[in-house]
Image (cartoon, coloured by chain):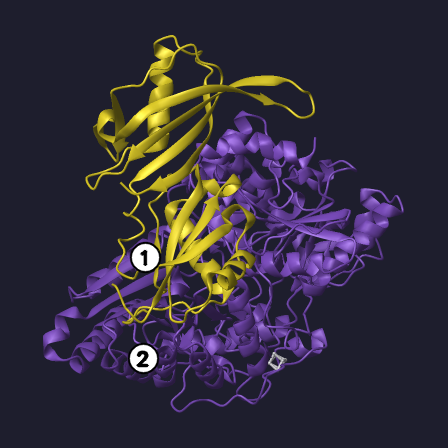
């Protein structure tokens, strides 16, 4: 893939608000259209049906936002990052706004696998008296049930702190719990953060650590790091 | 309740429904016009994926938004899972842009795209919290306007709409909405407003007419009689004469989720005068109007820059008929080289010219081609005025398969007027010979790659066509004919697909029925019929039982044939093409005489130009390519 004549630009953007509901495929199509609208000199593949040379970061599940999502774009000409960023911004919807870009080495690892450590923050509605982290998470893939060992994916502890959501007009406050945790994506598979949060809530509720009203309000990937 | 709070109520549902991105608005190109207090919502009676790329939605929201003081928004019927959630939680059906309940709009426009959308229209009204019947709506409720292809026989829908807009809406829709605004401002009642609107050309207010008996209808030329003297007896469709001069780039919304026709769609010409006798579109959009090559090329490039699409489709009923099509494609291909952007054409003529065009648009990618001979013998093709010969088909096959194509699909219709078993065997014979031709031009080692399939649609008699008087054959007869085609095909390499005769039957009833059909639609909907165009939801039982309970002879409506000239239930609605012309065309069909295309030859006196005070408006003279036919080729996108 590494073509020394091309310039590899890494773009950081947010995925937030309503657009957290985009699937990975929908996001990918949208990013391509942003690049085309921006009018930047992107490279295209050779072959029967030429398409844009663009590579996407690791996927987020539908409903999960990101503070620092990434994609790599291959350009045929060098344009200073400070010039390219406003072009991309002008072509992006607010909830997918790029906020930084820089050139990376053509031979650097693919952006989808370069940063296997993801830190997430979940906002739960409701307070906790204790937090119970399950040892396993069962997930369904099609008809098959799969059991994932949490220890294999979880790096460090799940931090929890309480907060309050104050409604602007009425001033009524709802107790909230903020969870923060880091998951590692393995070449063999990943533990989906939304499934993990669901499992934490279920085990906490069944152990009496929270009322059954506990609900997940938002889930966001805060950052992605290399190992 | 303000719109923000409606969104707050809807948002939590989106985590549990399929494809939430249908409901989120905020697409590129979507905008909420600020400061306009009079509101219009364009509603498509099917899900977002089906409706978002619809031309009427784009055109009419743009047209209304262009008027100071008027605001236009979009709404699509949610999918079944979301509908059920909304009903269960008693949440309103809202527009996309401002998330306002449909019921709070001043005017609702509902597209009537095809016969199988009827129950979805009721679903829209009910989900919006509106009375199904226009007469039961309150003064505060929106005025509900219907329009689109099915408005050419609006009678099966008459009680559900306050009025119908007949023909092209570019000018009529904003005119209508503006007039409603004025009248509401003057404090006019709903009744008064409708009466006033009936004076606008192209507007049909069904409640201002009363039905008459058959004898009177046949003598007076209409099944309906105006209740007041100032209400027109006949409603002529509206034509947008400014089409050719108007910009080919029409701002549009770029969806997040994948939708039907998800690409930049640029309408290059409107109308088709080839005159296939079964085709409603061919009668509906006369006269023929072309945008110029300059307009189109500029429009495409501007549209691509604004949307970021990687594909553009040059749309129309018959895009290769455009007098400057070769120039347009050549210019676009050179302007778009190296960008990975694909140019496609939804319908192409089937001849060597068509294949050349297909080469120009498809570049090196050779998927499948779709050819539409429609009938299996020359005799029947002449009867339906599909001016194409076997030789045309074969030379197109030669050209396509030598150029590298390996798959092709042939479209036919069964149940056409004057059809015999010989014509059905002819489908098999024609296809097998086409298959032989294809194999013979392909290198021997690739012969086993040649695939051919045929698709048989059931003839549905359409209002406003020369075949409107011909009944549909019964579903059992359809089955017999399909079986005959299948048995006659001896080659294993050819697969046969066909349409469900049961849905085609409902289409025929909707297409030909009068006011007596409306209660049937309503009852079928009450019995659970909705999303009839989706095979998995089509509920035949609901339709059957509804007819039984009402004692409605739906077989008679779908299957009875009339003498050409018999006054049909839609005779008060005019496409501009005269009934006399339709009658003449029906007789010519019987005699196997064909009628040429007026854009290539001379006027054939259909009456549209005179009646509508308009004329064909071509970018330059049209010339028939050598060996031309009016057979069409669709690229694969066309049949999705
Ligand atoms: S009136 Fe003549 S020129 Fe006009 S559309 Fe009809 S046939 Fe064509």
**Chain whose colour in the figure is purple:** B
- Of residues B258 and B457, the one drawn nearer to the viewer in this rendering: B258
Badge 1, how many Cα within 10 Å: few under 14, some, many 20+?
Answer: some
**Chain whose colour in the figure is yellow:** A
Residue of label 1: B498
Q: Indicate the chain on which mark 2 is placed.
A: B
Asked whether residue B130 is in view, the answer is: no
Q: Is residue B526 above or below residue B312?
A: above
Res B393 label: 2
Residue B426 point in image, percent of width and height: 28, 72
Label 1 vs label 2: CA separation? 21 Å
Residue B377 point in image, percent of width and height: 32, 75
* Same chain for the residues under marks 1 and 2 in the image: yes
Residue B482 point in image, percent of width and height: 29, 58
> Where the C terminus of chain B falls, by quadrant?
bottom left
Residue at 27% x, 24% y is A137
Residue A194 point in image, percent of width and height: 37, 31
Q: How many marks?
A: 2
Q: Quadrant of residue B347?
A: bottom left
Among the two numbered marks 1 and 2 on one chain, the one whose residue lies closer to the N terminus? 2
């Amino acid at each position: 893939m590494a073509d020394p004549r091309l310039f590899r630009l890494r773009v950081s953007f947010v995925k937030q608000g309503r657009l957290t509901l985009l699937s990975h495929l929908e996001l990918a199509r949208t990013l391509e259209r942003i690049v085309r609208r921006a009018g930047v000199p992107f490279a295209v593949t050779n072959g029967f049906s030429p398409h844009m040379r663009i590579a996407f970061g690791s996927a987020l599940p539908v409903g999960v936002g990101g503070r620092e999502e990434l994609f790599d774009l291959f350009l045929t000409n060098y344009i200073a990052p400070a010039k390219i960023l406003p072009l991309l911004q002008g072509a992006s919807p607010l909830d997918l706004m790029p906020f930084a870009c820089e050139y990376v080495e053509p031979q650097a690892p693919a952006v989808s696998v370069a940063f296997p450590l993801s830190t997430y923050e979940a906002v739960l509605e409701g307070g906790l008296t204790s937090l119970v982290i399950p040892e396993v998470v069962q997930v369904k893939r099609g008809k098959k049930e799969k059991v994932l060992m949490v220890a294999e994916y979880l790096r460090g502890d799940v931090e929890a702190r309480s907060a309050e959501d104050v409604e602007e007009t009425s001033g009524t406050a709802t107790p909230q719990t903020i969870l923060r945790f880091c998951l590692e994506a393995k070449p063999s598979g990943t533990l989906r953060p939304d499934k993990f949060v669901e499992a934490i809530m279920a085990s906490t509720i069944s152990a009496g650590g929270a009322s059954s009203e506990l609900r997940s309000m938002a889930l966001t990937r805060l950052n992605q790091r290399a190992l | 309740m303000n719109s923000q709070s409606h969104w707050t109520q809807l948002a939590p549902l989106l985590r549990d429904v399929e494809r939430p991105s249908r409901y989120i608005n905020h697409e590129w190109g979507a905008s909420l016009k600020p400061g306009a207090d009079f509101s219009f919502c364009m509603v498509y009676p099917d899900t977002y994926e089906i409706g978002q790329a619809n031309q009427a939605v784009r055109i009419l929201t743009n047209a209304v938004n262009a008027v100071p003081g008027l605001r236009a928004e979009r709404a699509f019927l949610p999918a079944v899972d979301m509908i059920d959630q909304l009903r269960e939680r008693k949440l309103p059906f809202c527009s996309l842009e401002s998330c306002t309940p449909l019921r709070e709009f001043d005017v609702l426009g509902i597209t009537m795209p095809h016969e199988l959308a009827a129950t979805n229209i009721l679903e829209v009204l009910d989900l919006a919290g509106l009375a199904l019947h226009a007469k039961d709506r309150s003064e505060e409720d929106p005025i509900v306007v219907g329009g689109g292809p099915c408005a050419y026989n609006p009678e099966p829908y008459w009680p559900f709409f306050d009025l119908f807009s007949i023909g092209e809406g570019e000018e009529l829709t904003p005119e209508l909405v503006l007039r409603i605004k004025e009248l509401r401002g003057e404090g006019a009642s709903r009744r008064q407003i409708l009466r006033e609107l009936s004076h606008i050309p192209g507007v049909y207010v069904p409640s201002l007419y009363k039905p008459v008996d058959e004898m009177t209808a046949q003598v007076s030329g209409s099944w309906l009689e105006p209740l007041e003297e100032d209400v027109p007896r006949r409603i002529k469709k509206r034509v947008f004469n400014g089409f050719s001069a108007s910009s080919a780039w029409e701002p549009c919304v770029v969806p997040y989720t994948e939708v039907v026709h998800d690409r930049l769609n640029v309408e290059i010409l409107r109308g088709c005068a080839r005159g296939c006798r079964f085709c409603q579109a061919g009668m509906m959009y006369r006269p023929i109007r072309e945008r110029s090559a300059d307009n189109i090329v500029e429009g495409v490039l501007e549209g691509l820059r604004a949307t970021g699409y990687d594909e553009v489709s040059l749309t129309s009923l018959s895009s290769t008929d455009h007098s400057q099509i070769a120039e347009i494609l050549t210019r676009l291909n050179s302007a778009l080289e190296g960008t990975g952007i694909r140019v496609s054409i939804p319908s192409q003529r089937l001849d060597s010219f068509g294949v050349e065009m297909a080469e120009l648009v498809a570049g090196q990618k050779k998927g499948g081609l779709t050819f539409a001979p429609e009938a299996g013998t020359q005799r029947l093709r002449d009867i339906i005025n599909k001016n194409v010969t076997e030789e045309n088909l074969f030379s197109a096959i030669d050209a396509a398969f030598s150029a590298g194509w390996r798959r092709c699909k042939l479209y036919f219709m069964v149940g056409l007027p004057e059809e015999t078993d010989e014509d059905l065997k002819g489908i098999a014979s024609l296809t097998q010979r086409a298959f032989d031709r294809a194999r013979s031009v392909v290198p021997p080692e690739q012969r086993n790659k040649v695939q051919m399939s045929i698709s048989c649609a059931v003839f549905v008699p359409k209002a406003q066509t020369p075949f409107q008087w011909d009944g549909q054959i019964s579903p059992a007869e359809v089955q017999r004919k399909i079986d005959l085609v299948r048995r006659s095909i001896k080659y294993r390499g050819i697969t046969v697909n066909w349409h469900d005769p049961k849905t085609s039957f409902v289409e025929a009833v909707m297409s030909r029925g009068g006011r007596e059909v409306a209660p049937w639609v309503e009852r079928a909907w009450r019995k659970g019929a909705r999303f009839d165009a989706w095979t998995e939801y089509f509920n035949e039982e609901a339709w059957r039982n509804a007819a039984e309970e009402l004692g409605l002879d739906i077989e008679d409506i779908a299957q009875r044939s009339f003498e050409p000239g018999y006054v049909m239930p839609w005779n008060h609605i005019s496409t501009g093409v005269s009934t006399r012309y339709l009658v003449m065309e029906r007789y010519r069909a019987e005699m196997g005489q064909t009628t040429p295309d007026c854009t290539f030859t001379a006027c054939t006196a259909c009456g549209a130009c005179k009646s509508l005070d308009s004329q064909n408006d071509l970018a330059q003279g049209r010339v028939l390519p050598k060996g031309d036919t009016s057979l069409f080729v669709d690229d694969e996108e066309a049949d999705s």
